[in-house]
Amino acid sequence: MIRDITLGQYYPAKSVLHELDPRVKLVATLIFVVSLFVAKGPVGYALATVFLVMVIRLSKVPFRFMTKGLKSIVMLLMITVIFNLFLLDGDVVFWHFGFLRITDRGIRTAVMVGIRLIYLILGSSVMTLTTTPNDLTDGLEKLLDPLKKIHVPVHDMSMMMSIALRFIPILLEETDKIMKAQIARGADFESGNLIQKAKAMIPLLVPLFFSALRRAMDLALAMEARCYHGGEGRTKMKPLKYESKDRTAYAVIWIYLVIMIVIGYGRQIYGWIPFI
């Protein structure tokens, strides 16, 4: 389960998405997230599915590798779907027992929320798997550059995000090593009730905490030894510059968002879009 988390990992490959400017991928991910909340009915989610599948194919990242990240949210996904399925009222009640009920609105909401959560993970994974942490830092800093005028520490925020993403796979690997070492010493992380399982995690969390703290201190000393003092006056080895493919990608993602808005709200506003 620990090794199945793909967030923060980079998958090297030669694809169109890997070559795009990181700013394009950040904006595209944000627009895709917005489109999932704009989507109304099966047609909107079908379009989001087609768009996501096309993007995954263009990334040349194996689909099986990308879906590994979904294993880490199975419990959250099940809780979200079950709550929406059994606790929402609706016009048509299919099953009723005490305060639990399955209604038409509950089924519809559970399906939409489940699909939305899965697509959020996959869409975010496409961005992190096709972009190095350094490129993400540069792209985020460049996008937030106007905030420097109101004294927002843009560079520090971008650097913290980059370090956090870079440390995710490292800490996951460290967690896996500590867990195997504790199991070899007789630790049991599976059996028992919820309280017993929580207590069994102490031999795992304590060394993991000290390991993370030690890595943070080593990183701080290394940055100081290299005279790092923040973003003031720093230059980029590879300055970001938009190319024709980046402008094309911007056009495609904005057209996609406009179509999703028309599908989602066209019937409500104008009454002429024949979609549910």
Image: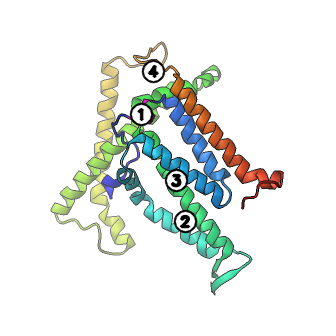
| Sequence-first tag of 1 and 4 | 1
* Labels 3, 1: front one: 1
| Marks 2 and 3, the one that precedes in the sequence | 2
N-term-proximal mark, 1 vs 2: 1
Which residue appears at 63% of the width and 46% of the height? 34
Q: Main secondary structure of the magenta part?
A: helix
**Segment colored magenta:** 15-19
Please tell me which residue lies in front, 260 or 187: 260
**Mark 3: amino acid:** Tyr
Amino acid type, callout 2: Thr
Residue wearing tag 1: 18
Q: Nearer the viewer, residue 42 or 6?
A: 42
Q: CA distance from mark 1 to mark 4?
A: 28 Å
User: Upstream in the sequence, badge 3 or badge 1?
Assistant: 1
- Looking at the rendered structure, the kind of residue marked 1 is His
Q: Residues within 10 Å of mark 4 (few under 14, many from 20)?
A: few
Residue at coordinates 39% horizontally, 50% vertically from top-left?
66
Say what secondary structure mark 3 lies in.
Answer: helix
State how far apart marks 2 and 3 are (Cα). Answer: 15 Å
Q: Which residue is identified by label 2?
A: 80
Which amino acid, mark 4? Gly
Residue underneath mark 4? 230
Is 211 colored magenta in this rendering? no
Density class for disc 2 (Cα within 10 Å; few <14, some 14-19, many ≥20) is some
Q: Nearer the viewer, residue 110 or 193?
A: 110
